Amino acid sequence: MRLRALLENDTLGLRLLSGEDELDRTVRGVMTTDLRDPSRYLSGGELVLTGLAWRREPEDSERFVRILAAAGVAGLAAGEAELGAVPEDLVLACGRHRLPLFSVVEDVAFATITEHVVRQVSGERAGDLAAVVDRHRRLMTSGPAGGGPEVVLDLLRSDLDLTAWVLSPTGRRIAGPTAAGAAAEPPAAVRAQLAGEQLAARRDGRRGPHRLTAADGMTYSLFPIRSGDPGDDVRETVLSDWVLAVGADADEWPEERLDLLYGVTQLIAVERDRRNASRTVRRRLAQEVLELVQSGAPPAEIAARLRVAAPVLLPGLGTAPHWQVVVARVEWGVTAERGYGPDGATRLGGAGKGADGETRGGGDAGAQLGSARKGARAGTARDGATWDGSARDRDGRDRGAREGSSPDGRDVPGGVPGGPVAQSLLEEILVDPYATGPEPSDRIAVAHTGDEAVALVPLPALGDGPSEGGTDHPRTEGAQADALLAAVREPLSRGLDGDGRLTLGVSAAVHSADGLRGALEEARHARRVAAARPGRVCAAGHQELASHVLLLPFVPDDVRRAFTARLLDPLREYDRRHRAELIPTLEAFLDCDGSWTRCAARLHLHVNTLRYRIGRIEQLTGRELSRLEDKLDFFLALRMS
């Protein structure tokens, strides 16, 4: 707005004292101050309101006006309440520096002027930005993207003083302002917190924008960037939608500004859909390779297929000397805890308790235990029909469909296909650290079948020297299960909360197409190990397949329950009655490899007290912790519990 417009509104009580030739200056904001030097808070274009409390002598006016003029303010409005009238020395100083000066009558509050200016300026900026955004939308929908989301984010910052970032469901920064002087992006922990809040809000059905004061003390407003049909089940898209995180509190924004921000999210969604479409060819090639690997095709045929697909799967890299396989499974309508219920029934991975109290078998439980012990476990299907773990349920439906292997995925537990969701997630979390393009997931090839997604991750060699094992293969780095968990657990757990699970399995690196079949099986075994653990998001790596961890998921529930009950129930009951902490003592003793001094130090006990507790454990169980066999039994019982 122009300074001249302020004089046209009689309710503002403004009277021009000097600067009539400067009334066409543009007002970009308003600031109230009585500081002697407010320069640090000025950025130019403001209407400064002052009560003159800073003025103690006539010379103060010259210093004050010089500071305002140097900062490039639009004008100065002085209240008459403090001195009764605007001093002549202030009028003269403003005239010398060509700074427009207004007086404000005593009965008009500065808040009235501030509200009027903010309303006018915001409306004009929103209108101007809306026009620019509309032009950009037409460009994006009729041709190539004009610079991507960064262009719109730069417009938000320059025209509305709003700094915003586009974040993925895991909190990865997808886009941010690029203009000089933009605020630093939130740290990784804060981005994960923002993404988790958005996912939780979507699952709860809360309408945006969502406000959150994050760990860095800043208040952010979150605007969802949604994909797909608005009528789709929220679980189909919640783990793949982006979010626009604005570094401001939108609680009292006018409707016009909120509408503008939602228009911005729709514009960014166009770019999101374009990026998804660009992955179609890469996904199809990955599907072809996966089918060859699963069908047991000769390695030479698989290698030939990879060479043909290399320009798409590995743009700019040529060939990949190493590959890694990552398997992910997303299930809905399952519990995430593993342990014993009140009635002693086991809840393992996808198995949970139904409303009728019967044990319900989820997809993971069937996948892990079916091949190891067909018919050993009875339960209740979702429709109430009993089944015995054989190939077909009593009503004739194929068990594979219930476990997520149906072609369309619509009869999986929870009624939502998990394969496409897992595919989008793997494309997000397996970002290639060597990519230099605008979208670093362009070198991740992911296929899906049923509830499962399989990623082929190329691993270019990092060096020419021998590996640590002494072989001639170049040294490589690949995805690690622990690192994947650290990156995605917090936000995705909130998006899965209630009835969803994500389990990941990571293979070792293989050096040719010959090893892809084994890597796929290795990753699937690791994922089954992860599925036996508690939590909404779990992962396991190939390293764990050489330990007892691999065997535990396949132990029948009744054997698991009997084994742990015989060893641990006497200790639990004693702890309940006497608060003796025998179970924690046993865990610490085994963790310290049976060292009396280290265990006593860890528990802050005298060694004699520790010896008394261990003796009580041996007395209650009839075992001796000096014997390796008994130590091993206790160790496994604690792990299975």
Image (cartoon, rainbow, N blue to C red):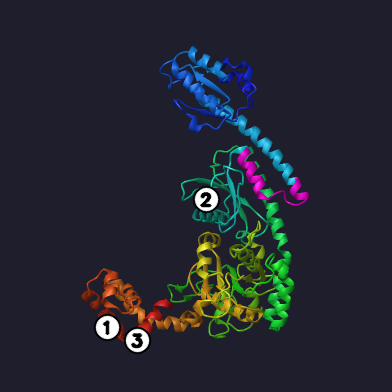
> Which structural element holds mark 1?
helix
Q: Quadrant of residue 154?
A: top right
How far from the left and from the top, in percent, is residue 28? Answer: 60, 30
How far across and how far down the image is residue 468, in percent?
A: 51, 77
User: Can residue 268 be found in the magenta stretch?
Assistant: no
Secondary element under disc 2, as helix, strand or loop, is: loop
Res. 354 visible in picture: no
Residue occupied by mark 3: 628
Report the amino acid beneath label 3.
Leu
Q: Quadrant of residue 329?
A: bottom right
Mark toward the viewer: 1 or 3? 3
Tell me how far mark 2 sits from mark 3, CA to CA.
Answer: 51 Å
Q: Residues within 10 Å of mark 1 (few under 14, many from 20)?
A: few
Front residue of 488/372: it is: 488
| Front label number (2 vs 1) | 2
Q: Which residue is mark 2?
A: 186
Query: Which residue is disc 1 drawn over?
Result: 619
Q: Is residue 454 above or below residue 242?
A: below
Which residue shows up at 50% across the image and 19% down it?
78
Magenta region: 138-158
Residue 140 on the magenta segment: yes
